[in-house]
């Protein structure tokens, strides 16, 4: 993000194309409709389907991703994003564009900290960060997630919860199993 609070753009598109980007009519029938978390589809196929189908959910679970595909941030209607069982150690700041996102699953990844971009996703109701390597919950990130109903932090290395956790008035389920002695 720039000092003005605007998001700096990364790559112009997810995937390199020769010539113009394909329109919806050029997407093969096999990529139209159906579920977004189908093992037989590649990451590229799933994201293309989501882009042109105006999907509200996208599942890229268990794809061995080390980076979130750049154009995921170009899915403004996305409400559910599942990126569990990958190798993610960070999230790109461009995800701030996902202002409709209500559920995010980042379980079973390689996150060592709660990504700062999450503090800008204020519509989030369900956040799954289980089985990472998180040690600290940044107060400025957690405190901004006022719509959270579910926060799963199981199987991390969290020692202390910030006082800002008490400002999450809508929080109904906080899971902290198998962390260091949380206080």
Image (cartoon, rainbow, N blue to C red):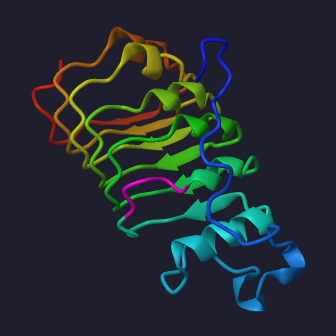
Q: Is residue 134 above or below residue 59?
A: above
Q: Is residue 92 above or below residue 5?
A: below
> Nearest the camera: 112 or 15?
15
Quadrant occupied by the C terminus: top left
Residue 115 is situated, as x and y percent measured from the top left of the image, at 41, 32
Give the side of residue 119 with respect to residue 113, left or right.
right
Furthest-left residue in this view: 181
Give the side of residue 30 with respect to residue 153, left or right.
right
Residue 56 is situated, as x and y percent measured from the top left of the image, at 71, 57
The residue positioned 56% from the left and 46% from the top of the image is: 103
Give the side of residue 25 with respect to residue 140, left or right.
right
Give the side of residue 75 with respect to residue 86, left or right.
right
Quadrant occupied by the N terminus: top right
> Which residues make up the magenta segment?
65-69
> Nearest the camera: 47 or 17?
17
The residue positioned 16% from the left and 34% from the top of the image is: 157
Residue 132 is situated, as x and y percent measured from the top left of the image, at 25, 45
User: Do we see residue 152 in this rendering?
Assistant: yes
The residue positioned 16% from the left and 24% from the top of the image is: 159
The residue positioned 30% from the left and 32% from the top of the image is: 113
Would residue 21 be counted in the magenta stretch? no
User: Do we see residue 36 in this rendering?
Assistant: no
Magenta span: predominant SS is loop
Q: Is residue 118 above or below residue 4?
A: below
Residue 3 is situated, as x and y percent measured from the top left of the image, at 60, 12
């Amino acid at each position: 993000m720039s000092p003005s609070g605007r998001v700096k753009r990364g790559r112009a598109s997810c995937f390199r194309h020769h010539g113009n980007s394909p329109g919806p009519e050029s997407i093969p029938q096999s990529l139209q409709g159906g579920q977004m978390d189908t093992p037989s589809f590649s990451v590229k196929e799933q994201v293309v389907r989501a882009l042109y189908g105006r999907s509200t959910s996208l599942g890229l679970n268990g794809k061995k991703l080390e980076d979130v595909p750049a154009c995921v941030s170009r899915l403004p209607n996305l409400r559910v994003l599942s990126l569990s069982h990958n190798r993610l150690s960070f999230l790109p700041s461009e995800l701030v564009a996902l202002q409709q996102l209500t559920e995010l699953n980042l379980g079973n990844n390689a996150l060592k900290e709660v990504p700062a971009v999450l503090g800008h996703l204020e519509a989030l109701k369900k956040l799954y960060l289980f089985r990472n390597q998180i040690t600290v919950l940044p107060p400025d990130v957690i405190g901004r997630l006022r719509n959270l109903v579910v926060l799963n932090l199981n199987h991390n290395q969290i020692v202390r919860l910030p006082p800002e956790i008490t400002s999450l008035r809508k929080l109904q389920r906080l899971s902290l199993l198998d962390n260091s002695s949380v206080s």
